[in-house]
């Protein structure tokens, strides 16, 4: 089988009737483009790097086939999954922005991050979706980060399923493709837990609220050491939020909340004065 040789650029038509317009992003697994679609619609098209029988592409294809059978209001809809000339092409609904885009919007207004009430509304959507994946389908996303939380009609859609893992599949290597700044300690040794996504969601909460991360490191190995062996720095958080996020960031998954929604509900119960109005 041969790999597609065509350069991916505006005007390229990976599927009949789907014409690429603007590149929205790129990562270890491929590129995402906005595209004109049949019927005058706008869609997102993801083109996976490599060929369908390469390890990365075949892993993503397997994950996508699993997730395409799962339906939830806050899970990004996968409309088509095709292998064209041995290259994987996915069509999804087109989001307006990502959670990180919303964060940037508030930063430009002089705030440290997304206002707490609005942020928790978004994270409640994400938490419900992640709990649904874990409880009903024994699946973990394992790459939760602001760029994978899309916004459509002011609600979150959980997207980018390249690392989705069956909790009963013990043969899959987890290090390739993960985003180490948001990864739970157990991910680095390939033993994900149904509470691993909660850990990532807690980091997203802190970053989107304060602009600060609980762990610092310039390389994968530095971040892995921080996640595995160091306590998180939660000083940027309001004091009342710190014990909640500290529990969600426990090194041992058993010590975390039972579900993502439990963590978000605890944060929703907190009353405090908020954060300074200017970036740190």
Image (cartoon, helix red, strand yellow):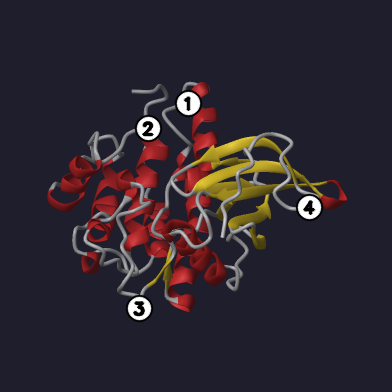
How far is mark 3 from mark 2, CA to CA? 35 Å
How far is mark 2 from mark 1, CA to CA? 9 Å
- Mark 3 in CB contact with mark 2 (< 8 angstroms): no
Residue 266 tag number = none
Measuring from the top left, give residue 210's x and y in whole percent.
37, 34
- Mark 2 in CB contact with mark 4 (< 8 angstroms): no
Q: Dividing the picture into quarters, in which one does residue 19 lie?
A: top right
Q: Dividing the picture into quarters, in which one does residue 141 lie?
A: bottom left
- Mark 2 in CB contact with mark 1 (< 8 angstroms): yes
Mark found first going from the N terminus, 2 or 4 = 4
Measuring from the top left, give residue 277's x and y in whole percent.
42, 25
Mark found first going from the N terminus, 1 or 3 = 1
User: Can residue 128 be seen at all in this image of the molecule?
Assistant: no
Q: Tell me the element at label 4.
A: loop
Q: Tell me the element at label 2.
A: loop
Q: Nearer the viewer, mark 2 or mark 4?
A: 4
Q: Nearer the viewer, mark 1 or mark 3?
A: 3
Decide which of 206, 29 is in the foreground and name it. Answer: 29
The answer to whether residue 219 is left or right of residue 14 is left
Q: Nearer the viewer, mark 4 or mark 3?
A: 4
């Amino acid at each position: 089988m041969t790999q597609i040789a065509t350069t991916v650029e505006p005007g390229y038509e990976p599927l009949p009737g789907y014409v690429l317009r603007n590149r929205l992003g790129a990562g270890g697994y491929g590129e995402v483009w906005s595209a004109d679609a049949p019927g005058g619609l706008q869609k997102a098209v993801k083109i996976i790097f490599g060929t369908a029988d390469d390890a990365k592409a075949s892993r993503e294809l397997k994950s996508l086939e699993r997730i395409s059978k799962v339906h939830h209001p806050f899970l990004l809809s996968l409309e088509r999954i095709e292998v064209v000339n041995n290259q994987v092409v996915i069509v999804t609904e087109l989001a307006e922005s990502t959670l990180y885009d919303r964060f940037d919007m508030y930063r430009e207004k002089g705030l440290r991050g997304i206002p707490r009430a609005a942020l928790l509304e978004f994270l409640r959507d994400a938490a419900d979706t992640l709990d649904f994946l874990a409880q009903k389908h024994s699946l973990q996303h394992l790459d939760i980060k602001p760029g994978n939380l899309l916004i459509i009609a002011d609600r979150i859609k959980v997207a980018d399923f390249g690392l989705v893992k069956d909790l009963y599949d013990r043969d899959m290597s987890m290090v390739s493709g993960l985003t180490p700044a948001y990864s739970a300690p157990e991910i680095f040794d390939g033993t994900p837990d149904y509470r691993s996504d909660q850990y990532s969601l807690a980091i997203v909460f802190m970053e989107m609220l304060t602009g600060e991360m609980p762990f610092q490191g310039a390389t994968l190995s530095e971040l892995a050491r921080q996640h595995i062996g160091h306590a998180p720095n939660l000083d940027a958080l309001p004091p009342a939020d710190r014990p909640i996020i500290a529990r969600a960031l426990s090194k041992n998954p058993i010590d975390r909340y039972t579900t993502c929604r439990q963590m978000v509900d605890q944060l929703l119960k907190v009353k405090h004065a908020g954060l300074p109005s200017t970036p740190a």
